[in-house]
Image (cartoon, rainbow, N blue to C red):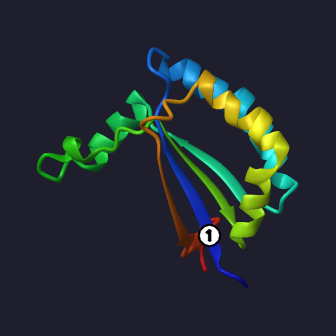
């Protein structure tokens, strides 16, 4: 099987937007528009990990044995991952007029694009669906 790659977006919410409103907009509107578009281009996976006040408290518990643990908790509001076998699949989705005319402008409703950062890498899976692979 070919290597699986991830395009990871470390995102911040728009200034003045609550965590609740941010999550609701991403989960009920933006993700629906994006997932239906990405499916047309062979994207393997599209996920969001929400980093809220609640989950930051959870992270603090996970780090309680590390001195100064709380200072190591990332402050991103959401981590988005888009996974594909060939970068060309994502580039075709990104360069499609629908992406440029609908998805990109939608970011103005929820994103702090000036602070958002990105990374690309390959994915290695070791446990999937509670089974060692």
Say left or right for 41 vs 14: right
> Is residue 9 visible in the rendered structure shown here?
yes
* Mark 1 nearby-residue class (10 Å; few <14, some 14–19, many ≥20): some
Outermost residue toward the bottom in this view: 1
Q: Using the image as rendered, state which of residue 8 and residue 106 is in the foreground.
A: 106
Q: Tell me where residue 111 appears, x and y as whole percent.
A: 54, 30
Say left or right for 96 vs 103: right
* Residue depicted at 65% across the width and 24% down the height: 25
Q: Tell me where residue 80 appears, x and y as whole percent.
A: 57, 47
* Residue depicted at 30% across the width and 49% down the height: 62
Q: Quadrant of residue 20?
A: top right
Q: Using the image as rendered, state which of residue 105 and residue 27 is in the foreground.
A: 105
Depicted 101 relative to depicted 96: above or below: above
Q: Tell me where residue 90 appears, x and y as whole percent.
A: 72, 60
Q: Tell me where residue 10 appears, x and y as whole percent.
A: 47, 46
Q: Quadrant of residue 130?
A: bottom right
Q: Using the image as rendered, state which of residue 31 and residue 52 is in the foreground.
A: 31
* Residue depicted at 44% across the width and 20% down the height: 15
Q: Describe the element under mark 1 as helix, strand or loop.
A: strand
Q: What quarter of the picture does the N terminus occupy?
A: bottom right
> Is residue 44 visible in the rendered structure shown here?
no
Outermost residue toward the top in this view: 16
Residue that badge 1 annotates: 5
């Amino acid at each position: 099987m070919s290597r699986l790659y991830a395009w990871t977006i470390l995102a911040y919410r728009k200034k003045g937007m609550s965590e609740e409103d941010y999550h609701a907009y991403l989960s009920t509107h933006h993700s629906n528009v994006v997932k239906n578009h990405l499916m047309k281009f062979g994207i393997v996976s599209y996920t969001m990990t929400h980093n809220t006040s609640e989950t930051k408290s959870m992270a603090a518990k996970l780090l309680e044995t590390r001195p100064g643990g709380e200072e190591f908790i990332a402050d991103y509001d959401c981590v988005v991952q888009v996974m594909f076998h060939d970068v060309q699949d994502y580039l075709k989705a990104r360069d499609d007029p629908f992406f440029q005319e609908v998805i990109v402008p939608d970011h103005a409703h929820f994103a702090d694009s000036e602070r958002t950062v990105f990374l690309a890498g390959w994915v290695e899976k070791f446990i999937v669906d509670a089974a060692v692979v």
